[in-house]
Amino acid sequence: MEIVKQTFSSARPKPARRVSFLAGLHGDELEGVYLCFLLVQYLRRLKETEPGAFLGEVNVYPAVNPQALCHGSRLWPFFSVDMNRLMGEPAGNSLPAGACRELLADLKACSDLAVDLHSSNQHLVELPQIRIVKDFEKKLLPLALQCNVDVIWVHPMAGVFESTLGYNLNRAKVPTLVMELGICLRIHRDFCSQILDGAIHLLHHAGVLNSSRRPRGEIKTPLVLKADQVGLVQAKRAGLFAGRVKLGDRVGKGDKIGDVVDPVRGETLEEIVSPFEGTIFTLRELPLIYEGAPLARVALEGPDER
């Protein structure tokens, strides 16, 4: 197997900084893969027309789990393992574990800053956002503010993160932003264009690029959320969810989000109303739901007052 890395070298003998972008740890998350295409295309044109703009080095790993990408599956096929759960030690001696060790070592050796690109699962669609483990907030938050995302979510540490790429790079003193946007197996071109502008802005902010071809529009000021500023709306009944709102909509307490219906009996089982006031940054996309299924996350303006 081969993991491809495209490197855009510095015009200086010693790069000011080295920044890496990677996508495809999960083979069903295609937003980041497409974003890497856009970024490589932009950097290639810039290299041809303005090579002196590269004050640092940019590395792009567009498809770090090619086997899963070819299958369109989250897990590495045949082995049925999650590549983003093999980055901690010890990870074993399988082919996926060996690939993870090689990838992690290469990123550590070639990066002063990294961006790990993800999409949501098949159930939920997400506004472009960066998720930060609270332990790394001080170093990562100023960088995340440069990325043109809608939301920055600072959340507590949990044991599941210990085996992820982002956590292990941050622990190795390589600041790494974990970004999530859209939904799996789809490409939202507007989201990708938005984050392309953010990636270029981040490269300028980091001193890696100095070009007149940077995006002209203003970078978004994201909502910065702590753990008590995220409200989760869940279903109380199983059935078919018919939503009434859009991603990014602002809702008030009592506003209707949708209905849970029983198509066999022709009954409305539950009217879903928001118990919060704020902005919907996660929304149910797959209509088939079970009891307790997440339907929406709402970015609250203040602490959760439930």
Image: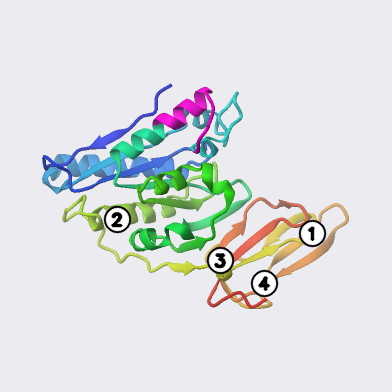
Kind of residue sitting beneath label 3: Ala
The one of 189 and 65 positioned closer to us in this rendering: 65
Spot occupied by residue 225 in the image (x, y as percentages of width and height): 50, 68
N-terminal of the pair, mark 4 or mark 3, is 3
N-terminal of the pair, mark 1 or mark 3, is 3
The one of 218 and 222 positioned closer to us in this rendering: 222
Residue 129 visible within the image: no
Spot occupied by residue 82 in the image (x, y as percentages of width and height): 56, 35
Instruction: Check residue 89 for magenta coloring.
Output: yes
How many labels were placed on the picture?
4
Mark pair 4, 2: CA separation: 35 Å
Q: Which residues are magenta?
A: 88-102
Which residue bears the numbered disc 4?
274
Q: Which mark is residue 227?
A: 3
N-terminal of the pair, mark 1 or mark 4, is 1
Kind of residue sitting beneath label 1: Val
Residues packed near mark 4 inside 10 Å, few (<14), some (14 to 19) or many (20 plus): many
- Which mark lies nearer to you, 4 or 3? 3
Extreme residue toward the front, this view: 90
Q: Does dot 4 land on a helix, a strand or a loop?
A: loop
N-terminal of the pair, mark 2 or mark 1, is 2
Which residue bears the numbered disc 2?
202
Relative to residue 93, is residue 204 depicted above or below?
A: below
Mark pair 2, 3: CA separation: 25 Å
